[in-house]
Image: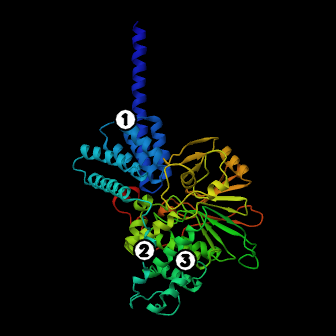
Amino acid sequence: ATEEVAAAAAEKEKEHQDEIFHEAKALELKDEGNKALMAGKTLDAIRLYSEGLEFAPTNAVLLSNRAMAYIKVENYGVAIQDATNAIKADPAYAKGYYRRGTAEFALNKHKAARKDFKKVCQLKPKDRDARTRLAACDKSVKEAAFAAAIESEETIPLSETYDPNQLTVDVGYDGPHPAGGVAPMTDGELDKEEDLFRPGHLPRDFVLAAVRRFKDQKLIHKRYVARLLINAKRHFEAMSSLVELSLPSSGPDADSKPRVTVCGDTHGQFYDVLNIFEKNGYPSADNPYLFNGDFVDRGSFSVEVVLTYLLFRMADPTSITLLRGNHETKNMNKIYGFEGEVKAKYDDKIFDLFLELFQHLPLAATIEQKVFVTHGGLPVAPGVTLDDIRNVRRGCEPPESGLMSDLLWSDPQPFPGKAPSKRGVGYSFGPDITEAFLGHNNLSLLVRSHEVKDEGYLVEHGGKTITVFSAPNYCDSMGNKGAFIHFDESMEPKFTQYECVPHPNVKPMAYAAGMGGLFA
């Protein structure tokens, strides 16, 4: 009996020592994860927090910190799971509610977010930041209720009532004019000015002058921006949700084959976009580009990026194709800086015109009927055809589920089948789903974007899925390369990688306000 007691005591002491070791190891990994997060190495931080949770699976601090890191890479679904587990582990841990509320807000679940921030205020009544976040939630809930109350089929879009003719180009404006020269067109010539903004009519000289002006951190006049947005919206509205692209008849120069260049997310990194054009040439009929969504947000030159793309599009619609990303949406723009940037550089009416335009951007494209391009990923419902995608109704914010949601939000996964997305919207789709969709629609390859990749691109699903990401050193912190893809007559992808280039000293998320500060 004495030996049994001694053995039990020894076992208990061993368990105690193991517990001490596990707690110490978890704390060590938490501290390393915090350092990685502070250094902008978010994926490393997630890995370190995950290793720490292997030693302490119910540690509320580790769970909450990993939730914060997941939020930074827009994995809101798993962030909510981690925050919920942190709350279960310690119901009095305010940061658990804080993280969950933040992720819920990003998913447009403002009432749920408000409930969590109320709890934070109860636990931390002197926390000013929590009260600020709660006020932001209250405001969003009220705005949504007001919008629902006034919404009707008869609501007239701003683009139908806004009159750019009422905007005067003042004598102090020293930027380019669409008709050329050093002065704007007179009041009697405004119909001619309007005509210049129809697709294919905008002078290329004006476009290139505007791009040079953007590079010098100057803007073009609001009247020209309003005309551009209104006419571009009407142009995209007339298109289907699926764009069918063919190779041009000739290449950009005598030594190049006809090709299409596909770029992924550029996220307001205007000077990196200029670097793409430096390496690959400006968009033209013989040098066409496809930009696969997420033109805006995070980077603080988003206005310059999206205006550049739209100017090229309206000068020559064959020169550049634009697809909608999950960041060409109202809620993302509110959080990640584009709304604040447009209002700082222009005003709220111009921002509303951007939102209208974004709602009408196409959702997908095919290249030579072989390569399928969309921002996020594939629909997980079996049997979806290109005609189904072609006929998706646009002119709205993305619903929580369905074809539009899948195309904008989904991600590939390495194992078969489908699973709820770690983002909290859309699905993760396996190689079998890719194979089935491509085969059913007589396609050979999926190209999507939506995720930062260390090398600027990643080939998955047995070579059937490519992710391309064109914003190098994303958010000035990720250290990744950017990439773009050439497709010529072979339809075999040819990759070009590049590093980031310097930009003016305006940090990412500089225009994010209110809840946006949580996502920087």
The quadrant of the image that shows the C terminus is bottom left
Residue at the limit of the structure toward the left, as seen here: 126
The vertical placement of 241 against 80, above or below, is below
Crowding around mark 3 (Cα neighbors within 10 Å: few <14, some 14 to 19, many 20+) is: many
The residue labelled by disc 3 is 311
- Assign a secondary structure to mark 2: helix
Q: Position of residue 143 (x, y in %)?
A: 34, 58
**Residue 510 point in image, percent of width and height:** 39, 66
Residue 211 percent across, percent down from the top left: 53, 80
Which mark identifies residue 161? 2
Residue 342: give x, y in percent of width and height: 41, 71
Q: Which mark is residue 158?
A: none
Establish if 209 lies above or below 505.
below
Q: Residue furthest front?
A: 154
The front one of 96 and 262 is: 262
Q: Residue at x 40, y 13 (%)?
A: 6
Identity of the amino acid at label 2?
Thr
Distance from label 1 to label 2 (Cα)?
A: 52 Å
Q: Which residue does the image show at 26% across and 53% down from the upper left?
A: 131
3D distance between C-alphas at marks 1 and 3:
52 Å
Q: Nearer the viewer, mark 1 or mark 2?
A: 2
- Residue on which the image places disc 1: 88
Q: In the rendered view, tell whether residue 182 sits above or below residue 127.
A: below
In primary-sequence order, the first of circles 2 and 3 is 2
